[in-house]
Amino acid sequence: MSESSFLRPALGKMLPYAPGEQPPPGKYIKLNTNENPYPPPSPVVEAIRSAAGGPLNRYPDPMATAFRRAAAESLGLPGPEWVLAGNGSDEILTILVRGLVGEGQRLRLPYPSYILYRTLADIQAANWEQVGFDPGWQPPDAFGQSDSDLRLVLLPNPNSPSGTVVPPPRVSELAESLDCPLVVDEAYVDFAEQNCLELVQQNERVMVTRTLSKSYGLAGVRFGFLVAQPQVISEFAKIKDSYNCDALSIAAATAAMGCGEWLRETCSKMNVTRERLAVRLTELGFEVTPSQANFVWCTHPSGHHEAMYEYLRNNQILIRYMQFPSWGDGLRISVGTDEQVDACLLVLNRFLEQVSSSK
């Protein structure tokens, strides 16, 4: 008997999700996993300290009620029953796939986009279908076509790796044309100009996922949430782990919801850096996709993307080299501090000068 013969056959066929590299702290400039380069707001840190001194021998609130109330107030939702908390938005996505897509059924995603979606379908022994974006990074009409075994459509908005946005009116059109739920993954929405929260109240089949990992600087806490109509939330609550969010993360997330001014100032500062990064990359000869996220996607006519990634890594700067079959490859660079971005640009310029001088 082989050591894996007791596992489900589907696991042997699937490829694992490959996260960005996480080196030891302080060794590298990290511009590869879309983390916030700034520390979280001080009320969040104080809330964690306070919770750490509390009754950690007791289980946390299984529904994270305090957070749900704070989120509803912060986001202008009718009430906390419109919110479900999760251990990062990845857990929320897992809950959605488990609850909506059965074995042999199908989910749809745009291409290229977040590759975890495919992994979640594979775990379910479900099928996944990729529909390519058009040249302007918008989903074509085929993205909104329904059929009998399509159970879920996922739309990252802003998208990764492009940072582009599908306007809410277009998202509404797609939702109306589908017979299944449309989940809008708004992991990066705090850096964008628009969001789709209003669509949730207009259509039971529209749901929005959010995370505190990016804009709130809480990637290490692992906290995300779902916004959907109450009758939908109550069903998904049956699927989550009994105590899926710990006491410290609930305290941190609840405090974060009261830090609206900090959020606006931090996102505005990062967006200024993002635009400066895009301009400078363009001056270096890159083609840069206009982004509304905390990263930029760029390609260079030389095509030396992997070599650029390796050169930067050898100089202790991490970015993300990404390759998409039938689409192409390129570089995704997270927005860091101004100093970190300047260091990245300096090394990229050095690489290009060396390539040019070797010709």
Image: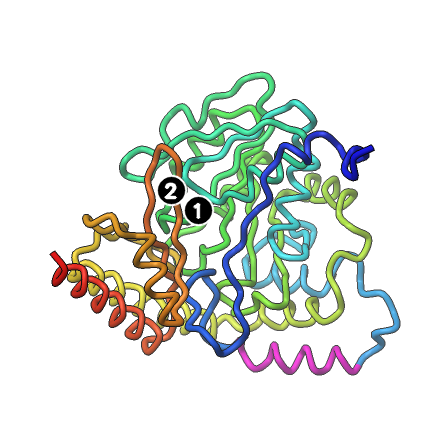
Q: Is residue 133 left or right of residue 347?
A: right
- The quadrant in which the C terminus is found is bottom left
Contact check, label 2 and label 1, Cβ < 8 Å: yes
Residue 53 image label: none
Residue 166 image label: 2
Determine the residue positioned at 74% across, 39% down. 235
Q: Please state the horizontal and vertical placement of residue 250, each as a whole percent of the image.
A: 70, 66
- The quadrant in which the N terminus is found is top right
Q: Is residue 240 magenta?
A: no
In the rendered image of this protein, does residue 98 appear above or below residue 68?
A: above
**Most foreground residue, 144 or 116:** 116
Q: How many marks?
A: 2
> Crowdedness of circle 1 by 10 Å Cα count: few (<14), some, many (20+)?
many
Q: Main secondary structure of the magenta part?
A: helix
Amino acid found under the numbered disc labelled 1: Asn
**Most foreground residue, 81 or 247:** 247
**Most foreground residue, 112 or 7:** 7
Q: Which residue is mark 1?
A: 157
Q: Which residues are magenta?
A: 40-53
> Crowdedness of circle 2 by 10 Å Cα count: few (<14), some, many (20+)?
some
In the rendered image of this protein, does residue 36 appear above or below residue 202?
A: below
In the rendered image of this protein, does residue 236 appear above or below residue 245?
A: above
Give me the C-alpha separation between circle 2 and circle 1.
6 Å
